[in-house]
Image: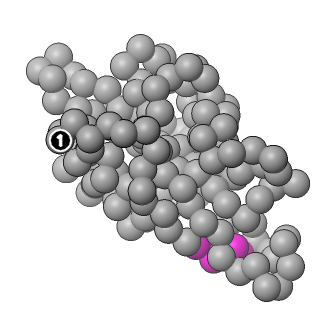
Amino acid sequence: MRQPHQILAFPYKKDETGQYLYGIFCRSGKKERWQGIAGGVEEGETYLEACKREANEEAGISYDANVIELKSISTMPVVNVTKEFIWGEDVYLIYEHCFGIDASKENITLSHEHTKVEWLTFDEAKKRLTWDSNRNALWELNWKLLNNKLDK
């Protein structure tokens, strides 16, 4: 069974000028919604394991890609994610744990969950993202990369 937690991960790489670019994904559906890679944490799975699994499932990123764990954690109403109270009526928030993934050597392959990926600078990506939690996590990742704060 799924845990009341999910992950959010942003692939990143440098362009030919050395500037960081971030992969953001357009969610499948009627509305255009841009985000990082997001998904649930399965029972018995760590947040890091869930991050690597979701990155592989949604974008074809290899399990050995370097992952940076971020301090950013946010909450969202359980009904926004699962449409119902699957863990009981007293669990009404899901915690989102955030990561960055080095995609320098990766070829992105989209799953059915996304219609496209775009590689954008921090400022471009920040404007395109739909949710504040994504903008916060992306800010932290960008700051860590620019200031060489890549503690894992």
Quarter of the image where one finds residue 136: bottom left
Query: Which residue is depicted at the point 81% across and 55% down?
Result: 2
Whether 97 is drawn above or below 99: the answer is below
Q: Which residues are magenta?
A: 76-80
Rendering coords of residue 43 (x, y %): 82, 51
Question: What residue appears at the point 58 percent right and 73 percent down from the top-left corner?
Answer: 76
Between 73 and 17, the one nearer to me in the picture = 73
Number of other residues with Cα within 10 Å of mark 1, as a class: few under 14, some 14 to 19, many 20 or more: few
Q: Position of residue 128 (x, y in %)?
A: 32, 54
Total number of numbered discs in the rendering: 1
Q: Amino acid at mark 1?
A: Asn
How far across and down, in percent of the image, does residue 51 sit?
A: 60, 40
Dominant secondary structure, magenta? helix
User: Magenta span has 128?
Assistant: no
Does 148 sit above or below residue 70?
above
141 on left or right of 62:
left
Q: Nearer the viewer, residue 140 or 11?
A: 140
Q: Which corner quadrant holds the C terminus? A: top left
**Residue 79 vs residue 42, the one in the foreground:** 42
Q: Which residue is mark 1?
A: 147
Q: Under tag 1, what secondary structure?
A: loop
Q: Is residue 69 left or right of residue 104?
A: right
Q: Quadrant of residue 22?
A: top left
Instruction: Say which of 42 and 19 sits in front.
Output: 42
Of the 4 image quadrants, the one containing the N terminus is bottom right
